[in-house]
Amino acid sequence: MELGIVYALLGAAVAVLMAGAGSAIGVGVAGQAAAGVVTEDPGKFAKVLIMQLLPGTQGLYGLMIGFVTLTKIGLLGGTPANVSTAAGLLILAACLPIGLVGLISGIYQGKTSASSIGIVAKKPEQFAKAMLFPAMVETYAILALLISFLAVNAVAV
């Protein structure tokens, strides 16, 4: 068996696990803030729930790259490809951006969302402005998703 498929699978795992962990931590942090607000004013549930969900996107991006990788190497809907060691390492490297950036941005987007939930708690009419702060963090997760997607697809298998 070629070692390349193991490296490619490791890349998919890195993308899914790290980005998913960042999202889980971020959603948890924002959820703690949201729960406090809803305790005081249940009418703000919808607005704070949206803020809490924002850090969850990094996990979805990592999952997407995981699926793209598994499809590329033939483990989803096909026959496993004969992935060379070099190609496997390239795929692993291509999965790193969303894994690492997803981990870090998910955590920091959760913290930013928690702060924005504080804005909504005191001034619910400022919801749109409060959304901009965590959305700025999201930008970097999207950039990492884009580079991982393009890089995985560029590797010849």
Image (cartoon, rainbow, N blue to C red):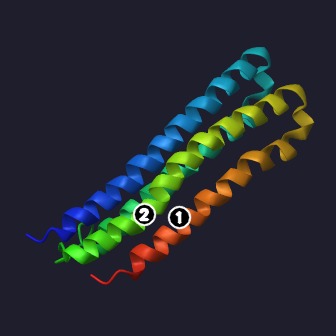
The numbered mark at residue 118 is none
The answer to whether residue 44 is above or below residue 138 is: above
**Cα–Cα span, label 2 and label 1:** 8 Å
Badge 2 vs badge 1, beta-carbon distance below 8 Å:
yes
| Residue 117 falls left or right of residue 55 | right
Q: Secondary structure at mark 2?
A: helix
Front residue (pair 148, 38): 148
The answer to whether residue 55 is above or below residue 91 is: above
Quadrant the C terminus occupies: bottom left
The numbered mark at residue 145 is 1
| Residue 133 falls left or right of residue 140 | right
Q: Which residue is mark 2?
A: 65
Residue at the image position 41 percent from the left and 82 percent from the top = 154
Question: Percent x, y for residue 134?
Answer: 72, 46
Residue at the image position 80 percent from the left and 25 percent from the top = 43
The answer to whether residue 44 is above or below residue 87 is: above
